[in-house]
Image (cartoon, helix red, strand yellow):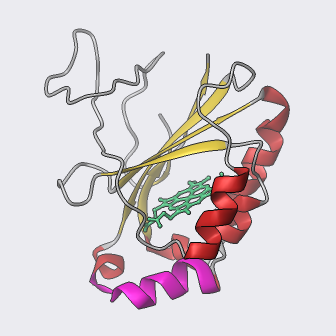
Amino acid sequence: MDAVQGQPLANVRAIDVVDGHPETLPDGALWLLKGITSFERYVYHVEREELLSKQPALKRPEASYAALIPVKKSSEWWQLPHDTRRVIFETRSGHIKTGLKYMPAVARRLHHGYDSEEEFDFLTWFEFAPEHSDAFDELVWTLRQSEEWCYVEREVDIRLIR
Ligand code: HEM
């Protein structure tokens, strides 16, 4: 699996998304990434309202394309105070503002791994219909040009078809 930045992951033909707490590598698997859903760190009330009104559910039948994008940020990022991170994340990079433009085409779920010292700080998961594939590429491209992404030290972009 090609890395956008940093170390790649070993190539696999398929992935399994498992709820719960798998501790051991299933037979034949080459890697296991773990993360947990958690509370929102940066979203303001007004943004949450807009997200809730626009965001589609996961597992829509027409959303047969998915992307799993594991991300690790640098220690420099984690050492910044929270308010500075919010300024970089939204005021200067427009992460939420940009993402909202792609809703309801793209469904998303964010998993955290930093606190449990996983290989990646975040496992980001997206689902969309084939006709929104170009729009998703544009979204990812836009975020990668942002100041926030200067703090990304490892990123792997895994595209999946159901
Ligand atoms: C589909 C449109 C998107 C929307 C609406 C969106 C929205 C959000 C929101 C609201 C958060 C903050 C959660 C919090 O407050 O803790 C967030 C975090 C994050 N998103 Fe997105 N996002 C989108 C697309 C993407 C894409 C395409 C990527 C990867 C290329 C991505 C990577 C991340 C990462 C790594 C974080 C964690 C940032 C951190 O806590 O430092 N997002 N996103």
Q: Which residue sits furthest top?
A: 27
Pick the front one: 147 or 125: 125
Residue, x 69% and y 63% (percent of image)?
Answer: 50
Give the left or right position of residue 106, taking residue 134 as reference: left
Residue, x 78% and y 37% (percent of image)?
Answer: 133
Q: For residue 89: magenta?
A: yes
What x and y, as percent, mark residue 109? 50, 45
Q: For residue 66: magenta?
A: no
Q: Is residue 95 visible?
A: no
What secondary structure is the stretch in magenta mostly built from?
A: helix
Q: Say how many tags the image has.
A: 0
Residue, x 77% and y 52% (percent of image)?
Answer: 102
Q: Quadrant of ligand 1?
A: bottom right
Quadrant that contains the C terminus: top right
Pick the front one: 102 or 73: 102
Write the start and end of the magenta stretch as one range: 79-91
Pick the front one: 93 or 59: 59
Residue, x 36% and y 84% (percent of image)?
Answer: 82
Pick the front one: 61 or 75: 61
What x and y, as percent, mark residue 100? 72, 60
Give the left or right position of residue 138, taking residue 81 as reference: right
Q: Is residue 68 visible?
A: yes
